[in-house]
Image (cartoon, grey):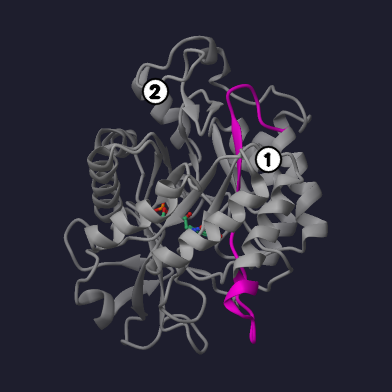
Amino acid sequence: MSDFEPFYDVKHSYEDNYEQGPFGAFAKALKTTPSVTSGDSSPYEGELEKKTSDGVVGESGFAAFLGQPVNLPFGIPAGPLLNSRFTTAAFRMGFDLATYKTVRSRAWGCNPFPNVLAVHPKSADGSLTPGSAELDEGVLADTDYEQPISISNSFGVPSQSPDVWQPDMRAAIAAAGLGQVLVPSFQGSRVEGMSEEEYIADHATTARLIKETGAKLMVMNTSCPNEGHNRLLCHNPLLVGRITEAVKNEIGDIPLMVKLAYIPSDDDLELMVRSTVGHGTVQGFSTINTISAKLVDADGNQALPGAGRDRSGVCGNAIRGAGLDMVARLAAIREKLGLDFKINGVGGVVSPADYQAYRNAGADSVMSATGAMWDAELARKIKSSIK
Ligand SMILES: Cc1cc2nc3c(=O)[nH]c(=O)nc-3n(C[C@H](O)[C@H](O)[C@H](O)COP(=O)(O)O)c2cc1C
């Protein structure tokens, strides 16, 4: 990978990436099409008029993502697209869904560098199974980035203040081409001394701030294992239900998707669906987020420096099996309950075959973070594979 440059450069800090990125093919895409406000960005644009060969067909004859027309329901989830320069470059590279990295109601710092390491599970196919002993015993992590790529990311969900991200998100939305959708992502911020009511209200406030940018839909993250301990909001479906009710009161008809981590129990997953979709507050789920693992270096020592960083979230090739499993189980619950909600499949998509596997498992749309970082041509490859 010596001459290869991921658009988010893992050798540099988050702050440097925010200021100077994107890099590699994404940087070139920004230079070749100077206007960032026109709908001239999709190399697949001509296809919008036609029905995509495998798309979820929307009312007007092409694919849709939470009610918005889209060329191909494929893109990049919350994470590597830090600001409007990244999302605009993603659109120009043919990713028709570009998620703006998770924002908060307030400025929030990033974990210390490094934030990304390559991860090498023991199994022959490089996969990690949720609940397996390896996740607690230690997975080798270093700077040897090999394909098929698996990494760990440890950022702590940094955010600019709304004064910065609101105008930038507006620009990001305006840069979407025909059949492309900017997907804002947000989460609540739990700070010392905050009551549960205040925590719920913080989600609603952040959703309102997003609504003010003119966003047509939004994704609420309930699944980041990178906040210092191993408890995730999505492990508490009833609290998620209360939060989504408060958010829905704030955003009205704007569709809301909830980002979920891997949830092992079908009963818990069904309770999540019942307490959100069942109350009309949620229109879709995006899943999965990273899988938490203990990371060790070649000597068996903690791989990431600093307290509370013995475990970190793994993504990429290693978690595709877990992502497909979650999507299939959610689709089965959708069928069983006869409820209407969308499923956005995420986790380990590195090839056109992986995109198809998620669609076959029941996903209405698909996204790739790690796979796209290491292959800027991924959207184009998927499009040419289904033409
Ligand atoms: C660099 C990086 C940063 C991420 N940051 C976020 C984030 O801010 N919010 C979020 O919901 N997920 C975040 N994620 C998780 C991804 O959205 C995705 O769920 C996960 O990486 C699995 O997909 P993948 O295997 O395609 O990478 C991040 C992932 C990466 C690689």
Main secondary structure of the magenta stretch: loop
**Residue in the picture at 71% in, 45% down:** 211
Residue bearing the label numbered 1: 215
Q: Image check: 113 left or right of 134?
A: right
**Residue in the picture at 51% in, 34% down:** 66
- Does 293 lie within the magenta span? no
Above or below for 334 versus 244 = above
Q: How many marks?
A: 2
Looking at marks 1 and 2 on the same chain, the residue that comes earlier in the sequence is marked by: 2
Residue 17 visible? The answer is yes
Above or below for 100 versus 188 = above
**Residue in the picture at 25% in, 33% down:** 360
Q: Residues within 10 Å of mark 2 (few under 14, many from 20)?
A: many
Q: Position of residue 319 (x, y in %)?
A: 30, 57
Element class at badge 1: loop
Mark 2 residue's CB less than 8 Å from ligand 1: no
Above or below for 74 versus 313 = above
Three-letter code, disc 1: Ala
Instruction: Point out which mark residue 55 bears.
Output: 2
The span shown in magenta is: 175-199
Q: Position of residue 254 (x, y in %)?
A: 61, 39
Three-letter code, disc 2: Gly
Element class at badge 2: loop
